[in-house]
Amino acid sequence: MKKFVVFLVIALVAGSLAWSATIGITVNAAQKLEVTVDAATWTIALDNTGTAIDVPNQGQLTVKSSKASYTVTFTSTNSGTLNNGSYTIPYKVKVDTSSWVAGVATNNLSSYTQLTTAKTIVFQLRTPTAGKTFPIGFNIEAYTDYYVDGAYTDTITISIAQS
Amino acid sequence: MQVKNTAECNMKKYLTLLLLLPLASIAVHSQSIGVTVIAASVGGSISMDSYVWNIAFANDGVTSYLNDQQSIMTIKSGTKKNFHVDFSSQNLGYVKQGSNQIPYFLKATLITSGYTGIVGTPPIVVGYVQLTSTQTITFNKRTGGAGIQFSIGFQIPAYSEFYESGNYTDVLTISYAAP
């Protein structure tokens, strides 16, 4: 009789229990860190008259980031000079980030700067998915001596990394 | 002569007994016996085919995530015909990574044919909903021993801003209760 009563009580308790299932959800949002330029080559005419070259909108740099803290770095293969054999022409670049003041912590290319060493722009906000686009300026200062005529080249590498 | 009388006497007793037997039988059938069967109450249950969902989100601002069958949910009502199933989210419908969060949406689609015990049109059955508050499906029919099955869908819409990359988490609780 006691067993029967105990069974009935247990059955009633089981009948009134609430059951639940717990599910752990993990969403991995992919990382996006990307820099692109509108043109992979720049061909610039130097008239060799001694007049400076200043093209504030030589190229367009677009930055995309899903990280709030990231750094864009500019480096030059020839440390900021265009080379034609042993002849060189120094040049400078700048990146105008004034359109997105809130997103930029430090811009070491806000004015024309020679890439003698790597130069950085440090960001502090994620970009929209369309990215943020900034003009790249190109400058060769006025000169008093002719440059030996011919083609002078350099390669600028722009990289992005999480800070 | 005495022998004959004795035989006749026995015959009369036998006939009398035969006559009385049906009466006795009628008397027995008129008795009532109270029979009570107590069926034990059996509780319902919920089970999933997967209790851990790992979802890769493209995070490109264009591609949404949509899986109409993220998991299969099986509900067994037990002995109760009136019961309800509640869906709740620890983060109120967001997966979170620190202070960053991504809204997500769920849908429950009945895939067991022939079951008609869902009361009304619960929003989570009609379409994808965010669990900003508890979503409930109310039932008024038992499910049978094998239970009924729902396909649980999961959705993250595309968004024009990047989400901070990394892992975002939430805990989804699906509860069965019978009043």
Image: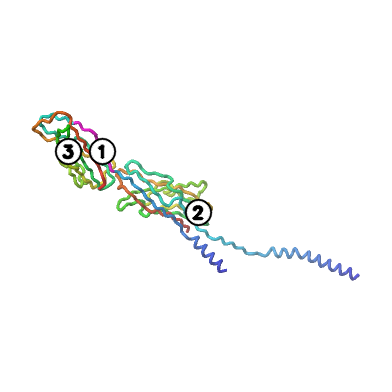
Chain name for mark 3: A
Mark 2 sits on what residue? B76
Q: Are marks 3 and 1 on the same chain?
A: yes
Q: In the picture shown, does residue B2 fall above or below B110?
A: below
What label sits on residue A36 in the rendered view? 1
Chain name for mark 1: A
Magenta residues, start to end = A33-43
**Type of amino acid at the residue the image marks with label 2:** Lys
Q: Are marks 1 and 2 on the same chain?
A: no
Q: Nearer the viewer, residue A63 or A116?
A: A116
* Residue A45 at x, y percent in the picture: 16, 29
* Residue B77 at x, y percent in the picture: 50, 54
**Type of amino acid at the residue the image marks with label 1:** Thr
Mark nearer the viewer, 3 or 1: 3
Q: Nearer the viewer, residue A150 or B9?
A: A150
Q: Is residue B155 left or right of residue A17?
A: left
Mark nearer the viewer, 3 or 2: 3
What label sits on residue B35 in the rendered view? none
Mark 3 sits on what residue? A80
Q: CA distance from mark 1 to mark 2?
A: 56 Å
Residue at 35 percent across and 41 percent down: it is B63
- Secondary element type, mark 1: strand
Q: In the picture shown, does residue A52 fall above or below B51?
A: above
**Type of amino acid at the residue the image marks with label 3:** Gly
Q: CA distance from mark 3 to mark 2?
A: 73 Å
Q: In the picture shown, does residue A5 fall above or below A113?
A: below
